[in-house]
Amino acid sequence: MYIFLDESGNFTKHNHEQYFVVATFTVGEQRRTDKAMRSWFRSKFPRRMRFQSEIKWSAAGIDEALRLRTLKHIARLDVRVRYGYLLRKNIPATYRTKKQKIDSGVLYTNIVGDILEQYLPQDDLLVHVFCDRRSLKGMKKGEFEEAIIARLAPHCAPGTLVQVEMVDSTANANMQIVDWIAGALARYHEAGPSGDEYYKALKNNLLAEGQEFFAV
């Protein structure tokens, strides 16, 4: 099983965003989706963007019609999506330091672990999780990867190899797919322009409704 994970938003105040969204997907053949996404970018996007190493959801110069067409293309790739979200103001005091700063490394690790556990148990003898690279306050990259492995391994069959890897999204089009999924779901929860249409495009690919963390 290959799982790709990315997020949208911040734990601290950023622009007018209120939500933090973590999105994941799994698919039967990762090379197929990688190739299909690269081909889409090169054939459907403005000429000046076609051969960029990465086209993110937030990239300038993409109109809403092209965003929606791209999401519908992603949906046709048969990606299976799970995601979670939190309202920034609901982050518990247990994740704040004495100076009221958010312990983002621990918070992010716990949220990611919760989402990934939803894929388990399963019969595959390989569970390989790819995450986009990000700074984790108070936690090193290796510590994050070990913590996620420790969360997942007890739910796997004996002998299952669990791998967690933070990767460069410019070298992996599947990471760009999950960036688009996270961005679209964040737009929906923020009630932004075309958010309902974006959610509708992905709805049939959701394995479950989004998990809200720390709901009050």
Image (spheres, helix red, strand yellow):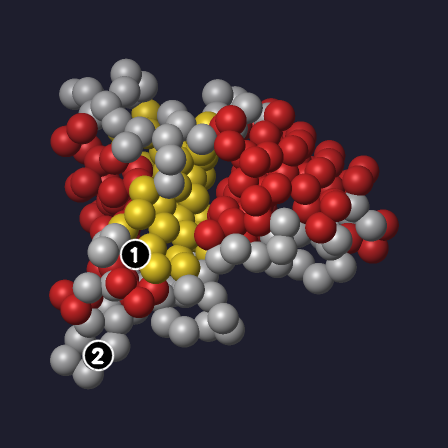
Picture residue at 76% right of the left edge, 59% below the top: 61
* 82 relative to 96, above or below: above
Residue lying furthest top? 123
Q: Residues within 10 Å of mark 2 (few under 14, many from 20)?
A: few
> Which residue, given by chain and number where applicable, does mark 1 sit on?
108
Q: CA distance from mark 1 to mark 2?
A: 17 Å
**Residue type, mark 1 in image:** Tyr
Residue at the far right in the pictured view: 47
Where does the image place residue 62, in percent across and percent down from the top left? 73, 54
Mark 1, residues whose alpha carbon is within 10 Å: few (<14), some, or many (≥20)? Answer: some
Quarter in which the N terminus is drawn: top left
Give 147 or 212, whichever is nearer the viewer.
Answer: 212
> Which labelled disc corresponds to residue 100?
2
> Which of labels 1 and 2 is toward the front?
2
- Residue occupying the point 51% across, 32% down: 203
Using the image, determine if residue 10 lies above or below residue 167.
below
Check disc 2 and give the amino acid type.
Gln
Element assignment for label 1? helix
Q: Which is nearer the eye, 66 or 50?
A: 66
Q: Position of residue 152 (x, y in %)?
A: 22, 35
Q: Decide if residue 94 is on the left or right side of residue 110.
A: left
Left or right: 188 as drawn, with respect to 70 = left
